[in-house]
Image (spheres, rainbow, N blue to C red):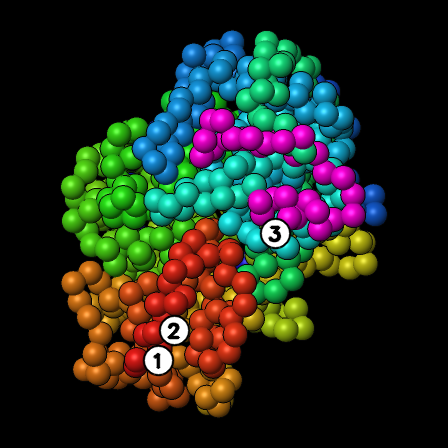
Amino acid sequence: MRRDHAPGRDDEVSPPGSFVADANATGELREAFAREGLRAWTRAADLLDWERPYETVVRDDEGLEWFVGGKLNASYNLLDRHLADRKNRVALRWEGATGDSRVYTYLDLHREVNEAAAALRSLGVEAGDVVTCYAPVIPELVVTMLACTRLGALHNVVFAGFSADELAERLRRTESSYLLTCDGYYRRGNAVTQLTTADNARMAVDHDVKSIVVCRLEDDVYLGEDHRGYAELLAAHEGATIDPVARAATDPLFVIYTSGTTGEPSRVTHTTGGYLAHVAWTGHTVLDIKPTDTHWCAADAAWITGHSYMVYAPLALGATTLLYEGAPDQPEKDRLWELVERHRVDTFYTASTAVRSFMKWGDQHPAAHDLSSLRLLGMVGEPIDPEAWNWYRQHVGGGTCPVVDTWWQTETGGVLVSTLPGIDPMRPGSAGPPVPGVEVAVVNREGEPVPEGEPGHLAVTTPWPGMSQSLAREAGSGDGEWLYVTNDRAVIEDGYVTFLGREDDTITVGNTAFGPATLESAVIEVEPVAEAAVVESKERGGTAVAYVCTERGSGGDDRLRGRIADHVTDRLGPTARFGDIVFTPELPKTHSGKIMRRLLAALADGEEYGDTSALRNPETVGEMETVVDDQ
């Protein structure tokens, strides 16, 4: 694909000179990768400490292997190596859903991780075992993840809102005999009991599962003989030290399952050396994280975004990571900006769907707080429209912060497509070029490249260190040119990738196929629309149904419906017509920020919508049923 871009485009935004002067990534980085090829990934590996140096950057032995011959430990790279220089620097700040908070220095976190590793080992956990973690965003979850890596065990983090069946399925598939959970947690101000759900899952599998319970709701919960209390276990190993177990770079680091919102969840395994090098490097170059930063990745730790850019990248780079247990609009809609101001957050990374929600709630909320500490904003998830991109930069970033609109997947481990904030001009609505070392193309269903500017499937054409074990096996098959063809539809113009939505979300109206992002962007251009989701209704003869949220203080009526319909046909042609436009106060979203389109399609067709345990806002479903009936 072309790497150059047309200079001086009207829609380009350049980063401020002050940012460029101090950016981690310099202007020669792309040229160096183009010149050196796969060998250039030594730059990522050099961000880590290796117990035994690797011999080969990448080797094809019935599958690609990265940093072959090298040995390292993830816990050592996230904690031990920082103690000499910054043991008293804050490693982790945690804000609870009810206003409680905790602070861990690197020395504090190192001590608790060692005690947790000793506790796990006393229960029988050894290298290669899988420890399942079923807990909200609390410090004990991160501690347990790092304790696993210290022992060479794998963690398998499951979203705390999932049902007993979902948890049991992941325990069963990983043959996990160890479970960290909690007595409960807080959701939108209400206490939610979790221990019963965990017990039901343990009883549903055909092997014994030892359970460790964090008392989140109460300090004196009776656990019985089936559980061990987290605090009591660590107290029994107070002051313990566990030498980090050296792992081969090719050894697995953790297991994670896709969210399963559009189908059957699939297992993804990431390796120790390749994954850790890739997320540290992209944290360094794309998110521009520095050791002096407070970095906030506003995601749930159960998803790959939380793994990569809440835990592994910021701690590997010696920064402070901020964790938040609560909802972004609890107790008020300015909650996130209050935390940014209080903790002087430097880099903020959130879901693109969250940005649309912020815009819908109104710019008075960020305006009420001093956000001048922010120097970089990031987004991940669904395609973002230019209006929301510009709102984010103007009202949260003060009109000066670079905005990196990143694309990647659970399978890729870390960012693959994004502007580098100190090098590349930004284009609102476009993610940007692939990161250095990665090549992409847009292809048709047969895997053949399409002409520039035409839509198709995004394909990654070169391997990268953070790729999952299954992708690495496919890439090293040796039977011709390798492509990782994704389900994401995109166009490439002047080297910049603009995403249009997923293939399985493609909507056919008449004889024309549209990506949801194309239709939604056109809807959002109409004032006062703040957010939209478009799905196909099979019961209505394959017509499109638009669910629309308006800005705060504005409502939806037939007049606005008409304006939306007229604007969309003007922009996209006469075939782009909606079978219905439904106004709703909120869209159903997962905790990773994805709009649950399966549920919206079911609502449009009057069908059963199934399990809603993955939703961040399950109460929205009942409200939307009423709205659909009324309209």
Q: CA distance from mark 2 to mark 1?
A: 6 Å
Q: Position of residue 512 (x, y in %)?
A: 47, 85
Residue at horizontal 47 percent and vertical 75 percent from the top: 601
Element carrying mark 1: helix
Q: Is residue 176 above or below residue 417?
A: above
Residue at horizontal 59 percent and vertical 26 percent from the top: 229
Q: CA distance from mark 2 to mark 3?
A: 26 Å
Q: Earlier in the sequence, mark 2 or mark 3?
A: 3
Badges 2 and 3: C-beta atoms under 8 Å apart? no
Q: Amino acid at mark 2?
A: Glu
Quadrant containing the C terminus in the rendered view: bottom left
Residue 20 painted magenta: no
Circle 2 residues within 10 Å: few <14, some 14–19, many ≥20: some
Element carrying mark 3: helix
Q: Is residue 3 visible?
A: no
Q: According to the image, label 3 marks what residue? A: 164
Q: CA distance from mark 3 to mark 1?
A: 31 Å
Q: According to the image, label 1 marks what residue? A: 629
Q: Amino acid at mark 1?
A: Asp
Badges 2 and 1: C-beta atoms under 8 Å apart? yes
Look at the image and give the residue range highlighted in magenta. Answer: 196-225
Element carrying mark 2: helix
Residue 186 relative to residue 199: left or right:
left
Residue 431 relative to residue 194: left or right:
left
Circle 3 residues within 10 Å: few <14, some 14–19, many ≥20: many
Residue 222 painted magenta: yes
Q: Earlier in the sequence, mark 3 or mark 1?
A: 3
Q: Position of residue 266 (x, y in %)?
A: 67, 55
Front residue (pair 254, 190): 190
Q: Position of residue 204 (x, y in %)?
A: 71, 51
Front residue (pair 578, 481): 578
Residue 615 circle label: none
